[in-house]
Image (cartoon, grey):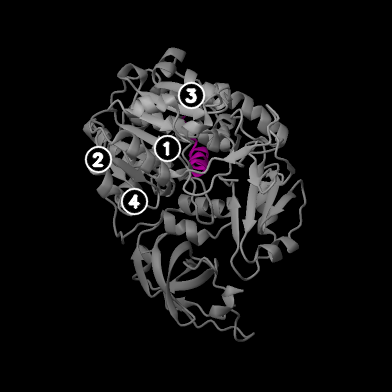
Amino acid sequence: MQEKLFELEPETDEPIQPRLPDGAVVVRVLIDEPAIDREFDYWVDADTAPSVRIGSIVRVDLRGRRVRGWVVERGVEPSNDFEVRKVSKVSSLGPPPALIDLCHWAAGRWVGSTARFMRTASPPNNVTSLPRRKRLAGPPTVTDDLAPRAFDNPVSVIRTSPTDDDTAFALAAAARGRALILTPSLGAAQHLALRLRRAGVEVALWDRDWAASAAGTVTVGTRAAAFAPIGPLDAVLVLDEHDERYQEEASPTWNARDVALERARRDDAPCALVSPVPSLEALRLGTLVEPSRRRQRDGWPVVDIVDRRGDDPALGEWCSPALTRLVVDGRSVACVLNRKGRARICVCNQCGELARGESGSALMLEGERLVDPVTGAQRPVVCDACGSTRMRRLKLGTGGVAEELAALTRREVVEISADAQDTAERVGRFDGDDRRLFVGTEALLHRIESVDVVVFLDIDQELLAPRFRAGEQALALIARAARLVGPKSLGGRIVVQTRMPDHPVLKAAALGDPAIFTDDEMELRAEARMPPHTALAAVSGEAAEEFMSAFHAVGGVEVIGNADGRWLVRAQDHDSLSSALRATPRPSGRLRIEIDPQRL
């Protein structure tokens, strides 16, 4: 165990406590060492004691090292297991008591250490005092008739259109008092904070304005702002609730939406989850509130579905005749293709039909067999539609498309991907008036602010991805693209190339009605016993095998799979799942426990 690094066992069985000075106060300190995740007792003298609060950040000595910690209790009876030493330094104010309790809850929910969450909840710089909260002349004016309804229920799910302005919801939250408002990106948080200030609302931008947030100022921020010190809360607002950036990639894989919901529940405050394509988790948790169908539909761009089944394979793997006409007419176009290497997808060389398995996933061509990446099932290379035995891979990536597109149009083509180091320099000050062509992975949709047309060169790769959330994620990509091109009334257009034109995701996008997809998907998930109807965890890492050997599946918890050293564990609810995982001894070595995996 990593605790042995600190030799925490007592060195003697005899009581080792010296007599403390008069007026000294014993405090319990959570050490900022996730590998230890334990509390120890220290004392502060009578002069320092008044400045030490629950949550105060201190420096203490621990077996020859000076480490950071948080005061989690005051006036405790010291334990005889360790010598009670003096707190070396009181550094800063820290998370308030309610937030400390929340960190303990989060550590249990996502099977992590409390210290990791306390880090998130702490100020980036030392804070010794809080500012006085300013009193506003009156609540901000809200003109949108839908926004006030967002807070009529304990949890409301607001299904907007992709091009709606969310400022009205933020103003409605601020009008209720101490509001916590989350956005998926820093840029969105900064823009929203600016708009609120222009409307007369005092705003704390997390985490730069930690002290103002602790003083009760309306707080706007990204994922980590779910642990902002503002409280007790009067309203909670999560914008673009579906966005995967709300989930932490590193373990523990906590989700800001779920933390925000828990904070709202504890403070008895209404919580509004706003999104053009709400997640199935949100739809199951809250009351759906929608604008009129006309308002929803008008907020989507035109979505052209290009059926490629009838295209001549000789025309190329990525460029349909419709796309050729589009890219040569001078408009700014962003072409999205989530492929940089070899593709999984195979198509019939005769009729263009996709090869699909019983799981619904695209089949991979491996030698003389078609292989289902989900089930591992194999079958001969035969097209289900026409019986042809000639299949080919769709293997062109973004680099190849960029080269061919430049040759076809004789225009500048900018290639963008998530790992491109010079993206900002190459995109430059693109504002939509430019007439360049862009090619890239889905990262492209987050690197430019507007464009005339977005083209999904191969949406089937997203729809058939071997992930149970593939449909949700594909619809979210289309909604993101819709935000870049604008509503149909302003000429917004999305082109989707597919060999599955009748897929529910594409119908939902074309009609501006996500319910076409989500209603059926909710039933399918229930039948398959998948989230949001159950709770899932993925266990991986070099210590995973030893961990799972000691794991006991009890109380409805079950191990449902193991592939490539990654175990899947399922339970009826998160409490049962987390309890079973936390009850299992944690071996030494790297271990990743991913609760609610997004890309599974």
Of tags 4 and 3, the one toward the viewer is 3
Residue 262 covered by magenta stretch: yes
Categorize mark 3 by other alpha carbons within 10 Å: few (<14), some (14-19), many (20+): some
Point out residue 228 in the picture as x, y percentages from the top left corner: 40, 48
Q: Quadrant of residue 527?
A: top right
Disc 3/disc 1 C-alpha distance (Å): 15 Å
Which mark is nearer the camera, 2 or 3?
Answer: 3
| Circle 1 or circle 2, nearest the eye | 1
**Front-most of residues 75 and 147:** 147
Which residues, given as a range, are shown in magenta? 256-274
Q: How far apart are labels 2 and 3 at the CA level?
A: 55 Å
Q: Which mark is residue 134?
A: 2
Task: Tell me if mark 2 has few (under 14), some (14-19) or many (20+) residues whose alpha carbon lies within 10 angstroms of its own.
Answer: few
Q: Amino acid at mark 4?
A: Asp
Q: Give the amino acid at mark 2.
A: Lys
Q: Residue at x 30, y 44 (%)?
A: 204
Mark 1 or 2 closer to N-term?
2
User: Disc 1 to disc 4, how far (Cα)?
Assistant: 33 Å
Sequence-first disc among 1 and 4:
4
Could you tell which of marks 4 and 3 lies nearer the N-terminus?
Answer: 4
Can you identify the residue that label 4 sits on? 207
Q: Is the Cβ of the residue at disc 2 closer than 8 Å to that at disc 3?
A: no
Question: How far apart, in angstroms, are the residues tagged by discs 1 and 2?
Answer: 47 Å
| Three-letter code, disc 1 | Val
Which residue is disc 1 drawn over? 336
Quadrant holding the N terminus: bottom right
Name the kind of residue labelled 3 in the image: Val
Indicate the position of residue 184 as horizontal and vertical percent values.
40, 41
- Residue 327 visible in the picture: yes
- Whichever of callouts 2 and 4 sits on the residue coming sooner in the sequence is 2
